[in-house]
Amino acid sequence: MKSSFAIITLFFIKFATLTMGKIMANMGRSAMEVDSTHLVKRLQGLYRIVSDILLIEQMLKVVLNREATYHFEAYQGIVILYRKCFGKDDKRGVCLTEKKHLIGATPELTKLHLWLLEIANEHVAHSEKKEYDPVRISIIRDNATRRAISISVDQVLWSPLSSDNFQLLEKLVKLLKSNLEKEIRVVGQLIIDEYNETLDGKDQEMCPTLSKQNNSGVKELP
């Protein structure tokens, strides 16, 4: 299922790119990759976080439409991805923050957010807490001698997240995505402004006489 989803996604991206290219060509526009400035790197990092948020959304849709026995698989994947979005990553160069991306969160959503990070740091990433450890090791003893004679291993596929938690998490993810989209629009506009300012500066260097005439009040050439 994962590979099929990836193939469909790649096909959609390729199709959308080709379609957008044709549309821009008909409108007299073209795409040009910009230099890797601080703002560009930030936008790239934000889009990588968006990818993780979208994956969390997909997992939530699956688990909310299936039985509770599937919660453990989704629980681990979601918690790890959620922690990744708020963790520092040198490759991304950016991460979500409570101050910026939890704007508008209710006390209930904030509490869930902190709990998810706690679970991720203490139980999933490091498995330090016994109650969240999915593997149980037991000793089988002889009742007469009380001596150990064998080992029993049980894998407990249990999730601390209930159906109500998953539904609340869905609201939390929607809030994060909304605040993330707002930041993406702001950073995108800053990149546009930065590029245009650089372009205007180059135009003035190439045509200093015309630039001087325009600044002195002489009417621009049509």
Image: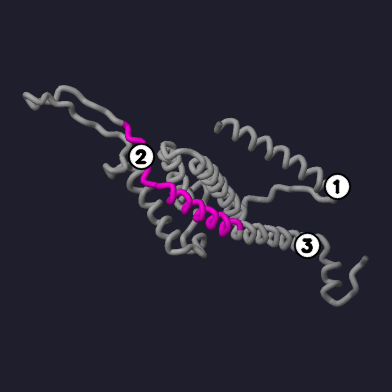
User: How many residues crowd around disc 2 within 10 Å: few (fewer than 14), some, or many (20 or more)?
Assistant: some
Name the element at disc 1: helix
Horizontal side of 120 relative to 184 (left or right) equals left
Q: Residue furthest bottom?
A: 217
Q: Which quadrant would residue 215 be assigned to in this image?
A: bottom right
- Compare residues 86 and 41 and report the one nearer the observer: 86
Image quarter in which the C terminus is found: bottom right
Which colour scheme appears in the figure?
A: one colour
| Residue, disc 2 | 158
Name the element at disc 2: loop
Q: Is residue 171 magenta?
A: yes
Residue 173 position, x and y percent, is: 52, 53
Highlighted magenta segment, given as a residue range: 155-181
Image quarter in which the N terminus is found: top right
The kind of residue tagged 2 is Trp
| Residue, disc 3 | 205
Disc 2 versus disc 3: distance between alpha carbons? 67 Å
Residue 170 position, x and y percent, is: 51, 51
